[in-house]
Image (spheres, rainbow, N blue to C red):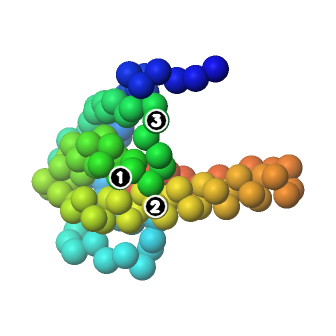
Amino acid sequence: MGISAEAALRFAFRWYGLQDRRLTSWTDPARYVPRDYQALQNEVTTQVTVPADTPPSALGPYVQTATARLFAAFDGASIPSSVVEDLTRNILRVGRKTDEYRGMHGKLATRQMVSLEE
């Protein structure tokens, strides 16, 4: 069973309960967030279409598209594409380690995907 060259995956995201929360980096707690970004709105909805044949190493721009409006809800924060790509690589690396852990121990170690502090 093959995938056609035109096949795509469509993702929709909805983040809510954001109002007055603060932006932090949960994937890399040592990563410096240059200021105290606070959410000015309660909800953000985005969507992105990813070609089905996109390799994991090329997901950064799609993650940027999916999250740009979310970050902007925090006092207009804009995360550089190089940072988003780095964070995406790190998350994928953690995911692979989680899969390895699951395979070795028959359990799934989970991590919270978003860190929004009140």
Distance Cα–Cα, label 2 vs label 3: 17 Å
**According to the image, label 2 marks what residue?**
89
What residue is drawn where x is 52% and y is 23%? 3
- Pick the front one: 14 or 58: 58
Sequence-earlier tag: 3 or 1: 3
Question: In the rendered image, is residue 18 in sight?
Answer: no
Circle 2/circle 1 CB separation < 8 Å: yes
- Left or right of 82? Residue 99 is right
Residue 45: x and y, percent? 28, 32
User: Looking at the rendered structure, which numbered label has been put on residue 17?
Assistant: none
Q: CA distance from mark 3 to mark 1?
A: 14 Å
> Within the image, what quadrant is residue 46 found in?
top left
Q: Earlier in the sequence, mark 2 or mark 3?
A: 3
Q: Which residue is mark 3?
A: 53
Say which residue appears at 34% left-offset and 30% top-offset: 49
Q: Which circle, 2 or 3, is nearer the viewer?
A: 3
Q: Is residue 89 left or right of residue 15?
A: right
Three-letter code, disc 1:
Gly
**Amino acid at dot 3:** Asp
